[in-house]
Image (cartoon, helix red, strand yellow):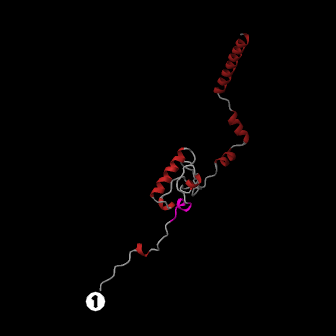
Amino acid sequence: MAGKKKQPRMSAKDLRKPRKKKVSPIVKDKIEYVDYKDVNLLRAFISDRAKIGGQRVSGNNRQQQRDVAKAIKLARELALIPYHQRVVSQRKGDRRRGRPDRDDARSENMSDEDMDDVVMAETPADDFVEMASDENSEIVEETMEEVVNE
């Protein structure tokens, strides 16, 4: 027993199934130059929120990633690609927590006639606005007469 040595265990990294490296669309399509005007190609490297994807995601090497990033930034500057896109998603849970909608509460408490009274109620400010509009119309009429007489 003294003469036997234990062999070292294989690490978890070595036990994993080797992954095939993702091939970049640049290599796949044999593109020599990443052009900022080629929006369809650039969209392949952008997420749904218009963020530039990483090298691991796209399969680019460092130089390709640098070229793609520069092209995307230039295309954004020239408004060919948006800087960000708003992603609307359904929120989880009801924020109103079982309370009824506001429209329903109003219609239950007040009839249509009551609503008309609330909207049509006059205030002292309405009288002032009417007086001001009358004065303005008189000034406009006087000015028009002066222009016509000249």
Q: Nearer the viewer, residue 55 or 134?
A: 55
Residue sitting at 70 percent across and 36 percent down?
A: 117
For this orientation, the residue located farthest to the left is 2
In this picture, residue 24 sits left or right of residue 114: left
**Is label 1 in a helix, a strand or a loop?**
loop
The image shows residue 107 at horizontal and vertical percentages of 69, 46
Residue 128, picture quadrant: top right
The image shows residue 80 at horizontal and vertical percentages of 58, 47
Q: Look at mark 1 in the image and give the residue it sits on.
A: 1
The image shows residue 113 at horizontal and vertical percentages of 73, 39
Q: Nearer the viewer, residue 14 or 99?
A: 14
In the rendered image, residue 124 lying in the magenta stretch gets the answer no
How crowded pointer 1 is (Cα within 10 Å; few <14, some 14-19, many 20+) is rated as few
Q: Is 91 rendered above or below residue 139?
A: below
Residue sitting at 29 percent across and 87 percent down?
A: 4
Quadrant of the image containing the N terminus:
bottom left
Residue sitting at 41 percent across and 74 percent down?
A: 14
For this orientation, the residue located farthest to the bottom is 1
In this picture, residue 92 sits left or right of residue 133: left
Q: How many marks?
A: 1
Residue sitting at 72 percent across and 43 percent down?
A: 111
The span shown in magenta is: 22-29
The image shows residue 38 at horizontal and vertical percentages of 58, 51
Q: Is 131 rendered above or below residue 94?
A: above
Q: Amino acid at mark 1?
A: Met
Q: Nearer the viewer, residue 16 or 113?
A: 16
In this picture, residue 80 sits left or right of residue 17: right
In this picture, residue 50 sits left or right of residue 16: right
Q: Nearer the viewer, residue 121 or 86?
A: 86
In the rendered image, residue 27 lying in the magenta stretch gets the answer yes
Quadrant of the image containing the C terminus:
top right
